Amino acid sequence: MNIFFQQVLNGLTLGSVYALVALGLTLVYGILHIPNFAHGALYMVGAYAAFYLVGSLGANYWVAMAGAAIVVAALAVLSDRLIFHRLRNAPPLHDMIAAIGLLLFLEAGIQAIWGAEFHRLAPPYPQIVRLFDLVAPAQRLIIIAAAFGLMFVLHLFLTRTLTGSTIIAMAQNREGASLVGIDATKVSVLTFAISGALAAVAATLFAPINLIYPSMGHLVIMKAFVIIILGGMGSIPGAIVGGLVIGFAESFGAFYVSTNYKDIIAFALLVLILSFRPQGLFPSGARA
């Protein structure tokens, strides 16, 4: 039972982090239809920002998380204003090429500053929590609680606030939203800021149990694209459910099959599910 519980815990940890990254990605795609491949680099920059704030400036872990979110949100907005906004009338392929170029630029910049070696963020909560016969690392419980708490806050923001409603309206009908006076530029800036902040928070949550290095965003962004395709392009519930599905599949697959195939499982699952549901798990419904 304890072994099974550990795999459930691992699946929830991975799934909640993947869902946060995929949420930011699906927000940008749902509203602006930009496949932002640079989102993985923003995730990586968030981890390095938190690492610098904690390691060099001695900041508290949660303060470092907030600082990393602000830094990456600003960087995401800057990328929108300087790159994607200028390509709004260009063919879609130009957005993809620009995103890949931004990814390579950010990775090269980080490597020039910190080098190519691996770094580690010391776990702020190294304690072990014991409940009956079950044992769980406190850091993993913190990751799950914080990630789901942030998802709930995002849900309330999108569904209960006027600003959130403008984001959903823009996602559902961009032309119609513009006709009723919604500022597309303001929505675009806000969407990129939220997307960047989610990536930074996900990276900071995951950094204490993972290594930090310049190319750490590659596999994460590939899985995030798998998740949003699996869940339904632009679907917020789909991003959350898809993240959890991939997280559980990796956790149980690594334990019961082999850790060598852990990263392949996500792509195999994508092919399997899309062969039965080509439109994804949530092809319609709440989108942003």
Image (spheres, rainbow, N blue to C red):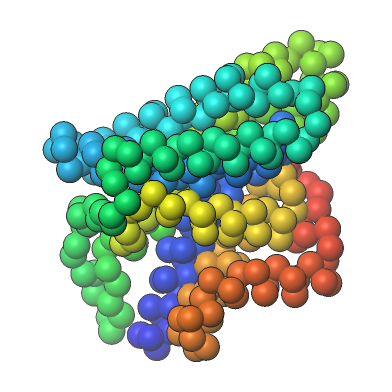
* Most foreground residue, 287 or 79: 79
Which image quadrant: the C terminus? top right
Residue 26 appears anywhere in the view: yes
Q: Nearer the viewer, residue 80 or 249?
A: 80
Q: Is residue 176 left or right of residue 150?
A: right
Give the answer, above or below, for where 231 lies relative to 4. Answer: above
Q: Residue at position x 60%, y 75% from top?
A: 265
Residue 114 is drawn in which quadrant?
Answer: top left
Point 78% across, 35% down: residue? 92
**Res. 176 image quadrant:** top right
Q: Is residue 2 left or right of residue 53?
A: right
Answer whether residue 198 is visible to the viewer in this image: no
Residue 275: which quarter of the image? bottom right
Along the horizontal axis of the image, is 121 left or right of 284? left
Left or right for 57, reference 183 = left
Q: Nearer the viewer, residue 184 or 79?
A: 79
In x, y percent, where is residue 284? Answer: 81, 49
At a point 39% along the width and 49% down the height, the residue shown is 214
